[in-house]
Image: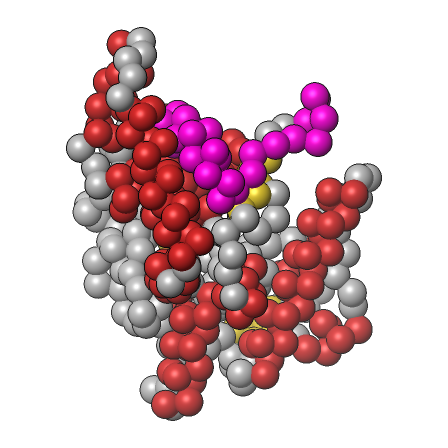
Amino acid sequence: MDNIKQIILQEENEARYSRKHIDKYIQQEIADSTFMQDKIVQGVDLIQNYLGKSYYESKNRRLAQIVSLDLTELVTNLFIGIAYFQIPELFTSATAQLSGRLGLSDRKEAITTVAEILAVLCMTDAFDIDKKDRLSSLMLTSRIPLSKELLHYVENSLYLPPMVCVPNELTNNYSSGYLTHNDSLVLGTGNHHDGDLCLDVLNTINSVVLKLDTEFLSTIEEEPTFELDNQEKIDNWTRFKKQSYNFYSLIANQGNEFYLTNKVDKRGRIYSQGYHINTQGTSFKKAMIDLAHEELIEGVPTI
């Protein structure tokens, strides 16, 4: 049984790093901003004008699904998602990430439609869509004003750290082990189902308590596994490395005992969840993690 301190720390970590919570913080700051409320009104007008025109047959069918939506809610929801792109994001990646906010059942149609809507909403100047030169890829960058504290949360929002208390028991296919939110246990958009999953196996793996090898982390520096042959790769690696060591410090300072939650893909293969701290990561990531409760192995034959 975890003590109250670890449970409180875990709740604080989830409130700080989970997008399910940060969405609400962004929504509140947008609601409190006269600047952003004007952008929402402008965005709704732009989309209404866009939807009021006739296009080719398949596009008209796609857009017909948007007409019935609350456009103010739609624009607000897209702006919340766009606010996460504080540094340039590939436009193709941004559209894929934002497509789920449309609520359309067909993934491909959702991505195509959100790409068109973003091109329209870009006229509000709430974000930029541009590229460095003719041969570069399109990039999307948010211009939505956020507080410094929220910007820090957004920077790390993609990556929940491991749990510092025992995960909740998984009781159905839409549960996560985390204290304040649930999620599908089946990886991949559109793959969720309510069929049989080996929840007992996932619960067993989730309950294994781990720790960081702080001596290893203090003596061996993490190095990239790829060539840093351009400035973009250098910047991405620098940012990732800084985030990683921040999370190492977080876990170490919160008792250096943690649990990784696990999910399955549609073939039933198990994957531990975690980006900066993960037993299925690079050689460095694997080497820095130990079992928290160490035992001597006996009966192993010697060579």
- Horizontally, is 257 left or right of 240 in the view? left
Name the residue rendered at 57%, 43% in the picture: 141
The foreground one among 76 and 5 is 76
Name the residue rendered at 57%, 51% in the picture: 86
Q: Is residue 244 magenta?
A: no
- Horizontally, is 86 left or right of 27 in the view? right
- Horizontally, is 69 left or right of 295 in the view? left
Residue 177 showing in the rendered view: no
Residue found farthest to the top = 56
Looking at the image, residue 219 lies above or below residue 131: below
- Horizontally, is 45 left or right of 64 in the view? right
- Residue 54 figure quarter: top left
In the rendered image, the quadrant that contains the N terminus is bottom left
The foreground one among 113 and 145 is 145
In the rendered image, the quadrant that contains the C terminus is bottom right
Q: Is residue 120 magenta?
A: yes
Q: Which residues are magenta?
A: 111-136
Looking at the image, residue 177 lies above or below residue 50: below
Q: Position of residue 99 (x, y in %)?
A: 37, 37
Q: Position of residue 278 (x, y in %)?
A: 55, 60
The foreground one among 127 and 63 is 127
- Residue 97 figure quarter: top left
